[in-house]
Structures are given as structure tokens and as C-alpha cells.
Image (cartoon, rainbow, N blue to C red):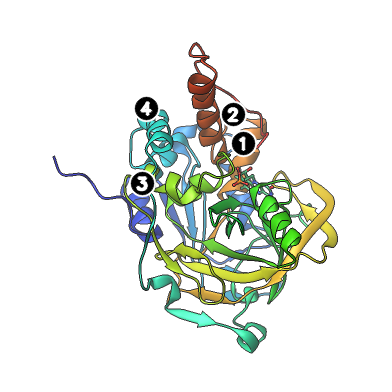
Amino acid sequence: MQKENYYKDVREHLKALEERGKLVRVKQRINKDTELMPLVRWQFRGLEESQRKAFFFQNVIDVKGKSYSIPVTVGTLAASTEIYSIGLKCTPEEIHERWTRAQSHPISPVQVERGPVQEVIWKGDDLLNGHGLDMLPVPISTPGFDNGPYLTSANWVTKDPDTGIFNIGNYRSQIKAPNRNGGLFLGQHMGEHWRRCKARGIPLEAAIVIGVVPAVAYAATSKLPYDFDEYRLAGGLAGEPIEVVRCQTVDLHVPATAEIVIEGKISTEWIEPRRFSLHYGDILFGSDVEANRPVDHRRIPDVDIFIDGNANLRVAADVTRAGVQGAPNVCRSRLSHLDHAKGLTAAADLVMNGDI
Ligand SMILES: Cc1cc2nc3c(=O)[nH]c(=O)nc-3n(C[C@H](O)[C@H](O)[C@H](O)COP(=O)(O)O)c2cc1C
């Protein structure tokens, strides 16, 4: 039997969700700062899991009435177990096996010359003239708690300056200005890259990728060993290599069919102390790091912002406990670790209560 190809890009993935009756297209105008996320959260407060949907908002405005040409999707990655399994192109029962196979049979990415993600490139003064981060309809995830718009499905790509091994981590990204954003990742693998760059006296190059195939997004939320490149895990999940293209201004590779890439360099000389909101709506007084970032994207970006984590993690935390979005893969990969590394084969499942 011929092997079925994985999704080429997010557009194919959305089509699959729609064909399975799992995507709601919202044509009405929606305010990204006050209405969008609360509307999506409602479905996690009363509906059966099987009734939950992913959302595609195509007429987004902000609190000042500004409208955006770029749509917003929410819940496409893991609003329910079934939606999660669509992202992996398997049945719900096969999810665990997919993860186990991907970790034991990772597939390295392949580099291609060019990809649709670089159809349009904005740099320098463009960023301050309407083509910077203010072009993106980034919602307020938890109105009343978040201190600004945050990308919550931001896949940060960096590499270890000593070994060259890549890391992809999903860390929220606070939009601070058209050419500046911040992240809180110092306790994560990317933080180790930052410290190693600091030791060498160089800035850390980073690219934030938005609108990736689910395999990349799932890999980015996974806690793997430090030197296990998430591109290889994503390839293992997809069953085929992820195509990557070289960035324009930094020495990094990003998925060639992604919707948007934000490139930049992060100073290792200073950290800006600021309030940073976490994904449950808590506000942490912490340190964050920011950078100047060029923006590349597809000619007409179809889908650019994913907010899955916020809506879903809330559920993971206080409703289902077993969780969705990051939780199943984190649980599953940790369970596999217990099974294989510690010999705890009697473990049937592992449940996390929002500790991601
Ligand atoms: C929606 C969502 C948002 C997240 N935001 C952050 C964040 O802002 N900072 C952070 O340290 N971890 C965050 N995480 C957790 C990391 O994605 C997770 O720990 C992952 O394993 C990090 O990748 P790494 O192990 O390669 O560092 C988030 C997870 C999800 C699902």
C-alpha cells in the first residue's frame, strides 16, 4: 500500500479539519482584544469533548477598530483528542504509538533552496511603516489578565553555538513594538543557547515561526533531551522529513512552508525586566529578552496566529486534567521515558495537571 503523505502546510491541515467537520469559519467581525479568546473558551465550559471545534476567524479587528487582512485560527492543534489525531494523521488510539515511533525513529530535515514562507520579506524601515509585528492580529489571550498581545503558538528556532544542533521551543512572545518582542525562555533549552552565546560574547540568533504543520508545533511543545533536534522529532511524527529553508538574516533554518517567520538577534548583554503573562493568565514578574526582527511571510498569509495553547491549556489545567495541546505529547513522551528508560512498564498513563 502506498504511504500517505503528511500535510504539506497548514492550509492542507485546515482543509482536513474542515472535511472532518472540525473547523468553524467565523465570517462576522470579531475583536481580537476582547472577544475572540473568550468566545473560543466557551466550548471548553460545557460542551462534550467530541463537539469541540477549531476556529478560523477571517474578519479580525482590534480594540481601536483597526481591521487585519490576516486571519486567526484557534484550537486547530488539540482542541480535542480527535483534532489532535487529525494533526498526526492517525486515529486517537494510534497517538501513543506515533509518539513512540517518532522518538525511536526520528527523521532529519532536508534543506531546500526556497519556500513559500519567503515570498514576501519586510526589513528595516518597512517594519516601522505598517509591515512589522503590528501587521499581525495577535489576540489578547486572557483579557483582563494579559498585559498585551502575545503569540502563544510561537515556535522559536535557535541553535547551540557550540554544536550547531537546533532547538524548537514553543514559548509565548510578547508583542512590544513593531520591531521588538520578548520571550521568557531562560529556563528552557533556548535559555541554554542564550547562556552559551553569552559566554562567547555574541548575541543569540532566533527565528519565530508561525503557522507550521502540526508535527512541528507538537515537537516544539515537547521536552526532549537537550541535544535532540526537534526537527528530527517532527520528521518522525510526520513520517517524512520537514523541508527547511535558510533564513534571510540569521544562520538558521525554518520550515519552508510555514506562514510567517520573524527573524532577529537577541542581546546577551542585557535583559529587560518586565511583566510577562503566562499561559494560564497569571502574570509573572520576570526577565525577558527582546530582539529586532525582520518579518518574512507567504504572499497572502492564510493563517498566521495559533492560540491553541492558551484555550486548551486552561482546560488541561482545570477541567479535563489529562489535558490537550501540549499535554498529551508531554505526558506520552514522559510515559514512554518511564517505560523504556526506567523499566516502569506497568504505567498505563500519565496525567499532568497543567504543569507544562
Ligand atoms: C501554549 C504554550 C505556551 C508556552 N509558553 C511557554 C513560555 O512562554 N515559556 C516557557 O518557558 N515555556 C513555555 N511553554 C512550555 C514549552 O513549550 C515546553 O516546556 C517545551 O518543552 C520547551 O521546549 P524545549 O524543551 O526545547 O525548551 C509553553 C507551552 C505551550 C503549550
CB at disc 1 and ligand 1 closer than 8 Å = no
Circle 2 — which element?
loop
Q: What kind of residue is marked 4?
A: Glu
Q: In the picture shown, does residue 125 fall above or below 318? A: below
Q: Where's residue 74, x and y in %?
A: 53, 53
User: Looking at the image, is mark 3 or mark 1 earlier in the sequence?
Assistant: 3
User: Looking at the image, is mark 4 or mark 2 earlier in the sequence?
Assistant: 4
Q: Assess whether mark 1 and mark 2 are in contact (beta carbons under 8 angstroms).
A: yes
Q: Residues within 10 Å of mark 1 (few under 14, many from 20)?
A: many
Circle 4 — which element?
helix
Mark number, residue 238: 3
Distance CA(mark 2)–CA(mark 3): 27 Å
Q: In the picture shown, does residue 86 fall above or below 301? A: above
Find disc 1 in the rendering and name its residue.
Answer: 315
Q: Where's residue 66, x and y in %?
A: 64, 77
Q: Assess whether mark 1 and mark 3 are in contact (beta carbons under 8 angstroms).
A: no
Find disc 4 in the rendering and name its residue.
Answer: 93
Q: Is residue 47 visible?
A: no
Q: Residues within 10 Å of mark 2 (few under 14, many from 20)?
A: some
Q: Residues within 10 Å of mark 4 (few under 14, many from 20)?
A: few
Distance CA(mark 3)–CA(mark 1): 26 Å
Find disc 2 in the rendering and name its residue.
Answer: 320
Q: Where's residue 289, x and y in %?
A: 75, 62
Query: What residue is at 66 percent from the left and 34 percent from the top?
Result: 354
Quarter of the image where one finds residue 265:
bottom right
Q: What kind of residue is marked 1?
A: Val
Q: Is residue 279 visible?
A: yes
| Residue nearest the viewer, comparing 235 with 229 | 229
Query: What residue is at 41 percent from the left and 31 percent from the top?
Result: 100
Circle 1 — which element?
helix
